[in-house]
Image (spheres, helix red, strand yellow):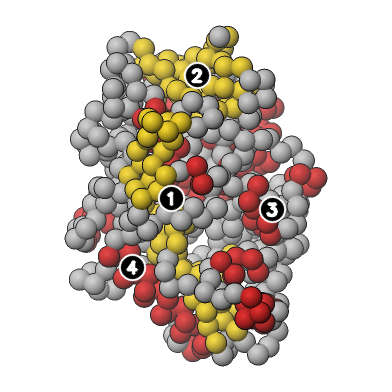
Amino acid sequence: MRTKHYDVVIVGVGAAGAVFAKQLSQAGLKVLGIEFGKYFQNHRQDFVENEAGVLSLTWNNNQYRVEGDGFSGTPNLGAHVGGGTLAWTSMAFRYFERDFKLKTRYASPLGTAFEDWPITYQDLELYYQIAEQQMGVSGTSLPWYNPRTSPLPNPPHCYFESSKMLEAGMNKLSIRSAPGPVAVNSRMYKNREACINCGFCRSGCRTDAKYQADKVLLPSAFATRNFTLESECVVLKILTEANGTRAKGVIYFDKKTKQTYQANAKIVIVCNNPMETARLFLNSADAKYPNGLGNEYDQVGRYFYAHPSVFGIGFTESKTAIEAGYNMGNIISLDFTETKNPNEYIGGFSLLSLNGSGLGVTAVDPLQNLYGQELKSIQYDYTKFLAMIAFCEGLPKYDNRITVLPQIQDTFGSPVAKISYYFTNHDRIVASKAVAKMRDVMVAAGAVKTYIRENPFESHPMGGMRMGNNPATSVTNEFGQIHSIKNLFVAGASLFPTGSSVGPTLTIHALALRTADYIIKNFRKLS
């Protein structure tokens, strides 16, 4: 087996991994990025404007064994170089200051188990700003946050016709609204085109008006000649040395050549999605860590959760032009993201408009109980729809977790993952509040009939490798550094102790920038 040598190995070159590739290679480190999926070098040719195109860009969730009602396999995680940024809907929210200290403010409701983040909003504020600049976020100051210290790089988009109707409805109900912060160019930005509102964001943006990490970050990494990308490869195991106190590198299989390789490195960073990150650590068990790397306290894979999500449409008697426009957040309200009555629930939900392609999704979500001609008759009037989504704050609990099944192996010989995920009573309460408020807004906006999926589905899986200060209740420290293996890091949403009620991608990016700075400043000590 051939062995290669690098300063850093990155496992997964997506929303977080691409950040490390750029930052570390520009700092002079020799970096290898290993990605399971393909590298699409010509987006204009490789992507298609077809709603079903999202399925070829997202992770195959059908491979998992699932227990519980919380995981339905929603296709919202990436499967190729660029990760989820190829298929995302581009919402680039900062988390709120309160999100980082949720337990201190409210304690854990019965049936949940979560901790404060080991960092504060102020620790991330500079990195949020850098991430927004790198992404090219369009938007304005929002009334739900403290005043910005600097403007977003691009102005907000104009409201679509459907957004104007939703704005009028929210005004009637005294609900505040604003253009959402989206990583979609409202004007030409750094040689990336402005959005043409084709409506197919989730199938990959052919014009690169949408932020896609492979297009925006990796060219800078390649330009240093310090970065090597191995696509269509699967990492099978993380290796350790020095009696388990250091990561030595990884073993990976190249799906193109059918060869197995070993890549040694001074630092290893795992940037997979939460299911695959926990699975890799559990499948890397060795003599020192018989239950999985970094799992001395049975924390790897625990506290898995997501945003319970609600999707609804409202049928109006006028043309809404919903079929055009970037997919999400042309207008938003965050009025309900803050706890109203902590004796009832904590956290809350965000309300975001939906536009563009989505006729197929309406059939499987808000219209899931309709079939045949009844379904078709409603969908024929798609251009008269209003559409919204609500992301609810999901709370972790101890037994919602990722494990592996040694007796069932994938095509590469690795035990498959089992997802145990049940929505909590708290999750259901918040989702029911979101359903009611969404219906109120749509009716006020002119909907004569509403169809809202009342049983929530999961968006944005998080947790499983929780960060914290106590090794007995977390897997990593504030930098994603494994407590017992100082040159082994984790990045991505698997670190999140709690997940707010807005999308996690900007926070994933900002955390990766912060950890990259830490690695650069401490590289000699870590290596």
- The residue nearer to you, when weighing 126 against 411, is 411
Where residue 461 is drawn, which disc sits there? 1
Label 4 secondary element:
helix
Above or below, comparing residue 452 to residue 18 in the picture: below
Contact (Cβ within 8 Å) of mark 3 with mark 2: no
Viewer-closest of 137 and 296: 296
Front position among marks 1 and 3: 3
Q: Which residue is mark 4?
A: 428
For the C terminus, the image quarter is: top left
Question: x and y percent of residue 412 in the render?
Answer: 53, 27
Answer yes or no: is residue 523 visible. no
**Mark 3 sits on what residue?**
53
User: Label 4 is placed on what type of residue?
Assistant: Arg
Residue 251: image tag? 2
The answer to whether marks 4 and 3 mark residues whose Cβ atoms lie closer than 8 Å is no
Left or right: where does residue 309 sit relative to residue 23?
left
